[in-house]
Amino acid sequence: MRQWQRVVAIVVVATLVLALESWIASAQAPFFKQCSYLRTGASAPVRPPYSLTPTDGLVKVTVTTNVGAVELRLDRESAPCAVHAFGHLALGGFYTGAPCGRLTSVLLECGPAEAGFRYPAELTGKESYPRGTVAMVPVAAGQNGARFFVVHRDAQLPPAYTVVGTVFAGIEVVDKIAAGGGRTPVWITGILVG
């Protein structure tokens, strides 16, 4: 009898959560956004995050590499779905061990392109990429995946990259990587959210 009661309790709670999510989404609550994450069938798929995400506040993220740590502030207001996806992947350990394998004269790119899901880019057409900007790398036209980049020198890029936040501390680590010219392999050893 106890097991039956547990099953009923789980079904009731799940139903209430789904009903609440549906109600918030349909009410177009100003503090939440309904995101659209599409599974891609990648070789190492990650379950997409829940579709409902907050649209207010900053998320502190510390990206630790084999060269040092960089502290980011991700902005839910400007790109709530991208911040939600980034946090979901980071909390699941997806980025641990991922390379920062592309270095250009203005940016350092990190992470695998595919996470097993994609989502629409969040663009206004007025994006700019000054030093310290953190943005997502598209995996297809208008679609983001998991890869991100940090701008280490003001970049004149087209407004085609979803800006998720800025470097709050540790830009000197990115400068050190850039000064090395990509001769030393760089990888992410962990990401702490919060």
Image (spheres, grey):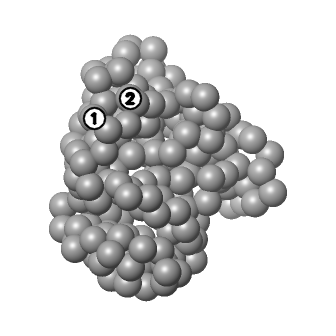
118, 23: nearer the viewer: 118
Looking at the rendered structure, the kind of residue marked 2 is Pro
Label drawn at residue 84: none
Q: In which quarter of the image is residue 99?
A: bottom right
Q: Earlier in the sequence, mark 1 or mark 2?
A: 1
Identify the residue at image location x=72%, y=40%: 39
Residue 170 vertical placement versus 106 (above, below): below
Q: Residues within 10 Å of mark 1 (few under 14, many from 20)?
A: some
Label drawn at residue 128: 1
Identify the residue at image location x=61%, y=28%: 141
Identify the residue at image location x=32%, y=63%: 61
Residue 100 vertical placement versus 135 (above, below): below
Q: Quadrant of the C terminus?
A: bottom left
Identify the residue at image location x=40%, y=30%: 158
Can I make out residue 104 in this image? yes
Q: What element carries label 2?
A: loop
Q: Return the residue at label 2.
A: 159
Q: Is mark 1 on a helix, strand or loop?
A: loop
Looking at the rendered structure, the kind of residue marked 1 is Ser
The spot of residue 127 in percent (x, y) is 31, 30
Q: Residues within 10 Å of mark 2 (few under 14, many from 20)?
A: some
18, 165: nearer the viewer: 165
Query: Tags 1 and 2 in contact by the CB under 8 Å rule?
Result: yes
Residue 47 vertical placement versus 124 (above, below): below
